[in-house]
Amino acid sequence: MMNFTEKDHKESEIVADIIKETDNSSIQELSEILDEMRVYQPLLISIFLGFKDDLSYEELDELAKDLIIIWKFFSDKPKSKKTKITENLLYKFDKKNAEFINYLSGEDSQKEFRNITKIDLESIESKGLLSGIFFRYNENKVHVNMNHKIRNELILQMRTLIECFEYINK
């Protein structure tokens, strides 16, 4: 897995709090956060809407929470409310991640697969956030029971969004 620094551990605690807070929020509170996202990062809403025909109501609810968790994590960073993530930026990271997945699918050795994945994950600055999102997809009943192909697509999309936020906040 990933090597965690002290910063990553502190970040994991923050992410755990964000997840708990999001899971315990009322529909009204979640709605207000979605409105804020629509103003500052409308692409997050576009991503949500892009999956509306493929997911059940329950799954859409969890996707909204995933996006809210990522937004809450980055919303206080200086450029998150000033610089919009564009479709081009999203595509750039999407393409990079898809190429990486294709490359991995050609790897025969499980050990080599793990080594390459570890090196790739080290490039993520927000390891605590990514781990929190991975945790939701591996532990949350709704995520676990999703169509496997769509679930993998969503995991990749969440990772791509994290990278986009990291990029605009450099």
Image: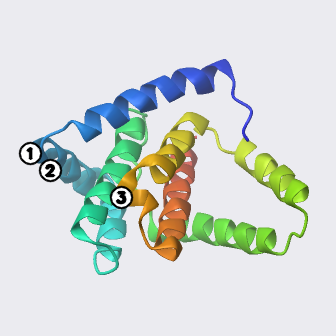
Q: Do the residues labelled 3 and 2 touch (CB within 8 Å)?
A: no
Q: Can residue 100 be seen in this view?
A: yes
Which three-letter amino acid code belongs to the residue tagged 2? Ser
Q: What element carries label 3?
A: helix
Q: Residue 15 carries which label?
A: none
Query: In the image, residue 125 lies at what x, y percent?
Result: 63, 38
CB atoms of marks 2 and 1 within 8 Å: yes
Q: Which residue is drawn at 59% across and 23% down?
A: 9
**Residue at figure coordinates x 46%, y 70% from the top left:** 87
Identify which amino acid the numbered label 1 is placed on: Gln
- Answer with the quarter of the image where residue 28 lies: top left
Figure quadrant of the N terminus: top right
Instruction: Say which residue label 2 marks.
Output: 31
- Quick one: label 3, few (<14), some, or many (20+) residues within 10 Å? some
Among numbered discs 3 and 1, the one appearing first in the sequence:
1
Q: Say which residue label 3 marks.
A: 142
Q: Is mark 1 on a helix, strand or loop?
A: helix
Q: Residue 158 location, x and y as percent? A: 49, 56
Q: Position of residue 19 (x, y in %)?
A: 36, 36
- Whichever of callouts 3 and 2 sits on the residue coming sooner in the sequence is 2
Q: In this view, does 13 lie above or below 90?
A: above
Height in image: 11 above or below 84?
above
